[in-house]
Amino acid sequence: MRIIRKNSKMFLFLVAFLFTNLVQAQQKTITGSVVDADSGDPLPGVTIAVKGTTRGTITNFDGLYSIDVEKGETLAFSFIGYTPQEFIIDNETSLNIKMAQSVVGLEEVVVIGYGQVKKEDATGSVEAISADDFNAGAITSPQELVSGKIAGVQITSGGGSPGEGSTIRIRGGSSLSASNDPLIVIDGVPVDNDGIDGMKNPLNAIHPSDIETFTVLKDASATAIYGSRASNGVVIITTKKGRKGAPLAVTYNQYFSLSTHSNQIHPLSASEFRSIVNERYANNPNALKLLGNSETDWQDEIYRVAYGHDHNLGLTGNIKDMPFRASIGYSKQEGILKTDGMDRLTGSLGLNPSFFDDHLRVNLNVKGMLINNRFGNRDAIGSAFSFDPTQPVYNDSPYGGYFTWVQQNGDPIPIANMNPVARLALQDDQSTVKRSIGSAEFDYRFHFLPDLRANLNLGYDISNSDGYTLVPEYAPWDYDKQKGGGTDKQYSQDKKNSLLDFYLNYVKEFDGIKSRVDAMAGYSWQHFWRAGQTKNTNAKGDYVHSDTDYETENYLVSFFGRLNYTFNGRYLATFTLRNDGSSRFSPETRWGLFPSVALAWRIIEEPFLTDSRTLSDLKLRLGYGITGQQNISNNDYPYMARYTFGEPTASYQFGDSFISTIRPEGYDADIKWEETTTYNVGLDYGFLNNRISGAIDAYYRVTNDLINFIPVPAGTNLTNMILTNVGDLENRGIEFTINAIPISKENLSWEVGFNASFNDNKITKLTAVDDPSYIGVETGGISGGVGNNIQIHSVGFPANSFFVYEQVYDADGKPIEGLYVDRNGDGAITNDDKYRYKKPAPDVFMGFSSKLYYNSWDFGFSGRVNLNNYVYNNVWSGQATYNNLYNSAGYLNNISNNVFETGFENPKYFSDYYIQDASFLRLDNISLGYTFTNYLDERMKMRLYGTVQNVFVITRYEGLDPEVSEGIDNSVYPRPRTFMLGLSVNF
């Protein structure tokens, strides 16, 4: 037996030796260089592969390469941003290549869930925006970089405060009561959408200059790989990384900005106010004696010219053949609202080593942020509109020296409007937030089977925030003789998000059957934990208003797989499946299965189009898939019976002791996922070598088992309203994108882009049993009255439709106060006469952009259009009535000049008169720059540029700003107009 084994080993050795020498005898070495076709500069990092094999190499720092090939084999040269080339090897021993930059550029490769794919091979609705196409301006929040750039994606900022958050909607909302926010993945780490206490926008952890691409997955065939969190689409943010073989490069970007408020809402001037009070209260000395002698423009008092500056330094290169990128950034932005501002320090480090002849590739990324926020008191915005303009800012009062409406005993009038300047000066609201996001990705290509890869991704997202709100005891709005006035609110929060992803990926070309298979299967584990506490006392700290703390967590465990199949280079199919288990649901409803399928036909590859000189791309896409929604509320245990401890003010007395109460909460033990089914058909097109390119998509989405708050019969649960699965919602729409390069010459080029999106939203079910008498769920709280809502979710209508009375007008077109159409004809005006009228979401929204390059000059602009979006003007409805001028408690209020148009004496909150068309065209930014290249032997480039942000808005809406995400305009923080001067240095 030993002899047999020994001879077997010798035989195998001889076979291997002879085979190796035979291969070596047939192979030869090809050497050469790869350079840029335009500049002649060497291109390091170009991938050179022997087609149909696993052999390959890359060019070195000088663009040189060496590779062993056989006669008749094909060498394929590829590099991101350049047109690929292929050469069949004959007798040559050297091959020098000039690669031309492609029109599509970086967009040729798009990032998808757990991998990436060539754009031409994508079967789903996926769109990527690279750094070259980002919006210009004084941008501190990353989502502003792509606002208006992507069809089907609507981004609406929450206001003009530095670092303000935004509402992101992809193809409309798919839920009513649950989250409508997309899943956001940062360098492979899915982050939660719950926000961070003391931080306006969780995306502010990333400096905009560190971002390479924004990729948006829109249809279910693209998003289903993320299963239970993908109903609202997926946004993948990829930051910049080092590149193997690239020389050391330094980038420095900085700008200085000046911001002013671009628009104001207009109450009565001091003279108009004094005149109308004298006119209407001529016989009321109590009202007349309240008039002051000043002429104060309260909006001028609370707003300012705001200054800001931003700096980002980045280093990219290699340390002993290990690519790296490091950056540090600092931003300081004042808000146009006095006392409002943000200071932010960011840093990032990426290391990308490879081992075992590139079989093991490692990507290490860590990002950190320290942000200090100062929050201006936004109550001052509403106060500035309605405060008496005849009063001075100061009058030596005991309330900080600020003018204050007081009672006869000298105490503040608690229901009176408060001095807006005092609101800003006497409230100190600050927070400090620390956050870090990191990942370690290990990608191993097996030596014994190079077609098989194993990928392990470990990630984290941790944050800590501390904040406080201090108001002195003499602040008039917080005055309390009995318990002690003022506020001392202290809060903190810690969050931890841990991730483990593992998958195997097998890619194989089967030349004999003209097929390519790309199969992937994996496992994901993610843990979300958060804890916090808040204590709210009076200014002295001797009376506790509330003292709460919490700790909560949830887990998400998933199994997923994807199969991409390509036949003959032009017929493509993608199948995905994900099985998610969420701890937010009971064991009976915990698991959800989310499949998808997509088909694509690269028509351009058909023989009948091979010689086309006009068409350069034509691909038909069909997709179907089911995605889920598990982010149904901020409660991690909605299916469990729970008890909540009462506040100190809710104690119950037993003798001389006070015992804290606990109360049971309502719950639904059978609550489960929302599920959204999406059908998508798309056509990608390109003309003239893709100088004209774009896509057309049509989709239909249905959400089943809709999460909704519904009333329950008394005695059947521990609450009268419960969160449960009931209802269906439909979205259908069309998207169109076109990008063109009308001019492409050596010293002159022009790029233009346009996209348009149409979305129709309708609720089809809201109750478990059909009930024609059920009007729906009222929502959309407004200022004025108690518990008033102006919107409703109703079957057969769009979500958040306005629910109002139909106003009657006189012969001159003036609304008649209190007179509405009796829509049901019962002879009385009741709640049954309200009707669903318009909605906040636009029917159509568009984005447009242009870039012009001439020699060293560049000029660009971008903007957006919304059509048929409506806004409820709560400023007019609440403050455009005559009876609001004087209150017998002893104070005056300013009112809107709209009162002259209506003549209303009393508020008519539910009149459809206040539902106004807020369609608009907004030019978001315009930029002019000049690039200097003749420094350090042309190794240094400097671009000096000027940008104006929020240039103008064209609209018929008469409120402050037509762009209101929820459709209710009430004391919105104005979006400033910003002027900036910037410098970008690269060497």
Image (cartoon, grey):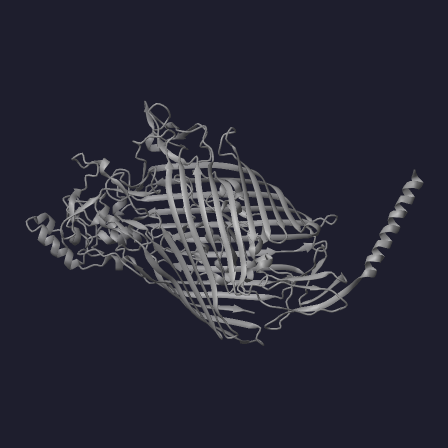
Question: Extreme left residue here?
Answer: 283
Instruction: Identify the residue shown where x is 73% and y is 48%.
Output: 449
Q: Is residue 491 visible?
A: yes
Q: Nearer the viewer, residue 726 or 742?
A: 742
Q: Is residue 510 left or right of residue 150?
A: right
| Image quadrant occupied by the N terminus | top right
Q: Nearer the viewer, residue 555 or 513?
A: 513
Q: Position of residue 112 (x, y in %)?
A: 55, 50
Instruction: Identify the residue shown where x is 59% and y is 72%.
Output: 38
Q: Nearer the viewer, residue 335 or 866?
A: 866
Q: Position of residue 376 (x, y in %)?
A: 34, 53
Q: Is residue 90 above or below residue 722?
A: below
| Image quadrant occupied by the C terminus | bottom right
Q: Position of residue 914 (x, y in %)?
A: 24, 48
Q: Nearer the viewer, residue 980 or 891?
A: 980
Q: Is residue 536 above or below residue 638?
A: below
Quadrant assignment, res 755: bottom left
Q: Is residue 343 above or below residue 802?
A: below
Quadrant assignment, res 834: top left
Number of marks drawn: 0
Question: Extreme front residue here?
Answer: 608
Q: Is residue 157 left or right of residue 43?
A: left
Q: Is residue 119 visible?
A: no
Q: Position of residue 470 (x, y in %)?
A: 34, 47
